[in-house]
Structures are given as C-alpha cells and as structure tokens.
Image (cartoon, helix red, strand yellow):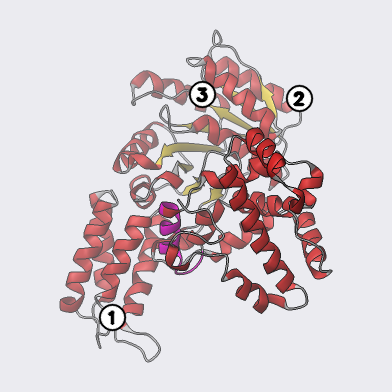
Amino acid sequence: MFESLSERLSQSLRNITGKAKLTEENIQDTLREVRRALLEADVALPVVKDFVEAVKQRAVGQEVTRSLSPGQVFLKIVQAELEAVMGSANEGLDLSAQPPVVILMAGLQGAGKTTSVAKLAKLLRERDKKKVTVVSADVYRPAAIKQLETLATEVGVDFFPSQAEQKPVDIARAAMEHARVKFSDVLIVDTAGRLAIDQAMMAEIAELHRVTQPTETLFVVDAMTGQDAANTARAFGEALPLTGVILTKVDADSRGGAALSVRSVTGKPIKFLGVGEKTAALDPFHPDRIASRILGMGDVLSLIEEAEQKVDRKKAEKLARKVKKGKKFDLEDFRDQLQQMNSMGGITGMLDKLPGMGGMAQMAQKNLDMKQFQRMEAMIDSMTPKERRNPDIISGSRKRRITLGSGTQVQDLNRLLKQHKQMQKMMKKMKGGGMEKMMRGMGGMLPPGGGQGGGFPFR
C-alpha cells in the first residue's frame, strides 16, 4: 500500500533540500508536486486542498535549525499533517459494555464484510482473550451464511446458525439471546450488502441497529474503490451512527487514497486495515505509523508487534539452541523459517516496514516469484522425515518422487537444496560469532543488484 504515493512524495521532497529558509516561493513547486501526488493517489479533492493549505501555512517562514535541513523540517510538517488527516492515534474497539458487546458490520457487497467478521473474531479471541459469537443476517445470500460458518470453525469461535427464510431482525434477536446463554463476551453481526446504496438496504440495517443497540458499528469498505470509498462511507454515516471503519484489500492498493480520505469525509476513525486474504491479516490502524511508511521511514513498531504475535517462540528458541550448539540446520528448520516469514507478510511485507526499504519491497514484488516459496514448502512436505533431516541422501530417484509429489520440477528441487546449503553455511558462521558473522553470511543470500541467482527465488 502507498507505494506510488510514497515514491511521488519522496521525489517532491528532494527538491527542497539545500535551501537556507522555507519560503512561499521555494516550496511552491514542492507543494504542487505534493498536490499532484495526492490526487493521483485518488485522495478526495477537498481533503487534498485542506492538506496542502495546512502544510503551506505551517511551512512558510520556518527557519532552518542547526540540526535540521529544510527538507527535514518540511518532511516533519508533512508527516504531522498526514497524521492529522488520518487521525491522531489508533482508536481501538469499545468492549467495556455489558456482555455480550454487539459489533454490527455494515458495507457494500464485495467489500469483504464476512471475511472481516472472521478476522475480527480471531483477533478478539487471540489478542483480547474474548469469547466470541458470530452470526450472519445476510438472508439474501445463503452462501454468505455458509461462508461465515466455515470461517468461524477455522478461527475457533462460536457460530450461531441462521436460515435464508428468516427475517434479519429475528436472527439478530435470537443470536443475542444465544450469546447471553453461551456467556459470550462479544457478538459480531454480519449484515447484507448490496451492489449499490439503496433505501431498502439502509432501512433494514437501521432497523438491525435499533434492535441490537451495538456498541460498535463498523463500516467495511474496499480500499481499491478510492474516492468512492469516502462517498459510500458518507452515505452510510448519514444512515447509521458509525463508530469506525475497517479498510479492506489494503495490500492490493498501491495508491492509498481511501485511507487519507475516509477519516476526513466521515469524521470516523479507521480502526483496522485488512492486509490480505488470510484470517490473521487484520492490523490495527496507527496513523503515525502509516504516515511514517508513506514517507519512506518504515514502521518498525508494527514489525516488532507482528514478530511478538506471530513468531512461534518455542520453534525460534529451539533453533537458537541448535545453532548455538553447532548442530545441523536441516530442511525442517528451513521450512519453519519459511512459515514464520510467511506469517509476517513474506519478504515484501517485512521490507515495507523497514526504514528506507520501501523501494526494495517494490523491487522484490516485481522480481520475486512469490509462488516459489509455496513450491519450496510443498517440496519439503513431500520428503520423508529422514530426507528432511539429511538432505545429502536425496538422489535422482528420490528427487523424481519428491517433485512428482509436490507438482514441481527437478530444477526447482535443485535450487531449494542449493539455497538450504547456503543457509546452513550462514548458520555455521553464527556459532559463537554473533550477529556480525550472520550479517556477513547474509551477503551471499541476496542477489547482487536484484539480478538473477543467489539465495532467493527470482523470476
């Protein structure tokens, strides 16, 4: 997300570097570029006008301090205004009401409501240790009810069944009673979406809101719709007392206009970002961290939080002890590392959060064959435990069996074995040598200049 906006803003801000003082004249060109970058990112025009004017008012006349260059002063101002547009801080869910706390999900069809219900339920169960019940009041799409039932089983939360013949209001009442009997802390109600805003839809969801009296009414909107996201949010905001927004499909949106527009247009905070298809791919929205990422300064705090939540500590400690003792780094260890990296958004997801690495993440996205990592895992899964622990025994006949079982080619397996050897060498260097040796070892893992070869699977 924000790749194109980040790139354009970075180019714009370079123009002002080296000036002795920030004046209206020498920032005019930069502001014009900032305005253009925001419009190309599909940020709503009124938001762009207010943003550019606010930056201009703060920037003009600011003297350059001894420690900061004009470019840094201007960057600081832009960052502060970006945060102001998106909201000053992360606003979590209000779960302080009498259980079961009702969360009502609203939005257009195809925005990702049902998936977001499952993601939110998983987050509340795992992070907040809440007992969660989910229910679908979408009687117009029986497939949506079945989908939610499947997802509820996947994330390990209670599912209240409903039928297409029932009235949404009756479903909601029954679900609330069920949640009370089950001593659930939270009840999440999935509502019907439409392809466009219509009166019948708004009347139905307004009635659901009246009956359930939700503590949180979350508007789920697709980031890919750009300015339309803000317009739709405004329409829902007029019909319902929204408490927040979940912005979905953020990982597929390189522009980021919706994130910059929705808060200003609705006056409601973005509470979560949907950053992928998996049920774990829901992140709390932190305006300061997002502003930092837009300006190419990374988001190390989110990376640390992800590592704490998603990295398997037992496996990590086991590998650390193994390496310290100088034991062999085998293919089971290699598979664990692939899985851990994948749970944190893969290479591009991790690079995107590191300061100054946004461009590297984009390059990796273009050059890396992401499916190669899935193939690598499939090949390791197709091996016997003995082969995983001792890859040297993998001969021609074993290679044919492994590739046949994983749907891959022999050259894919040869590449995997070569990469494992490189990782093994790197781990040996770590024994008693600490971080310095590891970093030197990593030099052999990355292809020079992003070209062919090396340890990672490039196209």
Per the image, the residue denoted by label 3 is 208
Q: Quadrant of residue 9?
A: bottom left
Distance from disc 2 to disc 1, alpha carbons, whole Å, reads 64 Å
What percent of the width, then of the height, locates residue 66?
A: 37, 92
Which residue is at a point 57% across and 69% down the rendered structure image?
Answer: 444
Q: Position of residue 46 (x, y in %)?
A: 24, 51
Q: Is residue 356 magenta?
A: yes
SS at circle 1: loop
Circles 2 and 1: CB atoms closer than 8 Å: no
Position of residue 266 measured from the top left corner of the image (x, y, whole percent):
37, 44
Q: Is residue 49 left or right of residue 443?
A: left
Look at the image and give the residue range highlighted in magenta.
Answer: 354-366
The location of residue 440, given as percent across then percent down, is: 61, 75
- Badge 3: few (under 14), some or many (20 or more) residues near its Cα, within 10 Å? many
Q: Amino acid at mark 2?
A: Val
Nearer the observer: mark 1 or 3; the answer is 1
